[in-house]
Amino acid sequence: MKYRNLGNSGTIVSEFALGTMTFGPEASEQVSHEILDTYVAAGGNFVDTADVYGNPGGHSEEIVGRWLTAHPTEAAQVVLTTKGRFPMGAGPNDLGLSRRHLGRALDDSLTRLGVEQIDLYQMHAWDASTPIAETLRFLDDAISAGKIGHYGFSNFLGWQLTKAVHVAAAHGFAPPVSLQPQYSLLVRDIEHEIVPAALDAAIGLLPWSPLAGGWLSGKYLRDTLPTGATRLGENPNRGMEAWPDRNSDPRTWAVIEAVAAVAATHGASSAQVALAWLGAQPGVTSVILGARTVAQLADNLGASALELSATEHDALTEISSPRVAEYPYGVQGVAQRHRALGGGRA
């Protein structure tokens, strides 16, 4: 397992984080704890959850909290992150990024996790109803109070991220250190605006859904619904039928077939190839793995030992290139993006 700085902070995290959205709804508490055991034993130290994960919300945090309590030695090495923003009650103030809601949400997360400090507290999405300065002041105060170590965002647009960075600087608040966006070989649109904004602010990217909801796992064939113990096999409407445009798009299957071809040359799984490609993208700090079983996690973690050649990496990058409008993301945009991603003048 390799380790990297968490964005512009001094905190060190593993190249793969463990996502816990499956804990409770798709993995029992016993299996969830076995997944945590396996992850930490492999050298992983970055555990990601959120207050709304689980059924009911908060269940995932409670499962993680009980594991932390039962494993104090391992818990001392874990960099823990959770999120707040979405409804945890029926009242008008039971959601959002206001000081009122976040104050209660953070205290509740600390209680469920059984810790005194959360290493990284992430805003789960933008809140247009709350001035960003109010949110940032709360987060700065939470750092001063020792309740959180750092803060970051999830699902922010490029302009929202940049605005938050500059408002924080203008007020003298601690800066954000991370952004958690959806990112994979099949979902690369964040490269137009969001990735350059993150690179400009030295903010680390923590991609979620790196296998595009299972599409890059190697289990799914063109126009064929999967069977067996997969998310799509247990509930096909969650996958191919829920994504008719993706299923009918030749680009989807060209990417999947290219990933499978690279995997075959390495004796690796398609999932490992997709994860290795993503982990090597500019700005990526840690890729979030979401496993339902220990076997799934073990396979995903195998990506840590997989080294793609420059030719393989470039071929996957080319075949998965996102479609763009001519302006501003056409010829001019390609040149600008090339410079933003470290390609120098173009």
Image: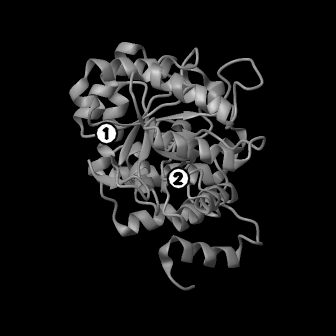
Residue located 58% across and 44% down the image? 154
Q: Amino acid at mark 2?
A: Pro
Classify 25 as above or below 307.
Answer: above
Element assignment for label 1: loop
Q: Nearer the viewer, residue 103 or 156?
A: 103
* Quadrant of the image occupied by residue 139: top right
Residue 85 visible in the picture: yes
Instruction: Locate residue 269, reporting x and y percent.
Output: 36, 43
Instruction: Count numbered badges in the picture.
Output: 2
Could you tell whether 23 is left or right of 265 in the image?
Answer: right
Q: Amino acid at mark 1?
A: Asn
Q: Residues within 10 Å of mark 2 (few under 14, many from 20)?
A: many
Instruction: Locate residue 4, reporting x and y percent.
Output: 33, 55
Could you tell whether 128 is left or right of 227 in the image?
Answer: right
Label 1 vs label 2, nearer the camera: 2
The single residue placed furthest to the bottom in the displayed view is 345
Q: Residues within 10 Å of mark 1 (few under 14, many from 20)?
A: many
In the picture of the structure, the residue carrying the numbered disc 1 is: 45
Residue located 63% across and 28% down the image? 238
Quadrant where the C terminus is found in the figure = bottom right
Instruction: Locate residue 310, reporting x and y percent.
Output: 37, 69
Residue 225 visible in the picture: no
Instruction: Locate residue 286, reporting x and y percent.
Output: 41, 49
| Earlier residue among tags 1 and 2 | 1
Q: Nearer the viewer, residue 62 or 271?
A: 62
Q: Which mark is residue 206?
A: none
For the residues labelled 1 and 2, the Cα–Cα distance comes to 20 Å
Could you tell whether 321 is left or right of 128 in the image?
Answer: left
In the picture of the structure, the residue carrying the numbered disc 2 is: 176
Residue located 60% across and 21% down the image? 235
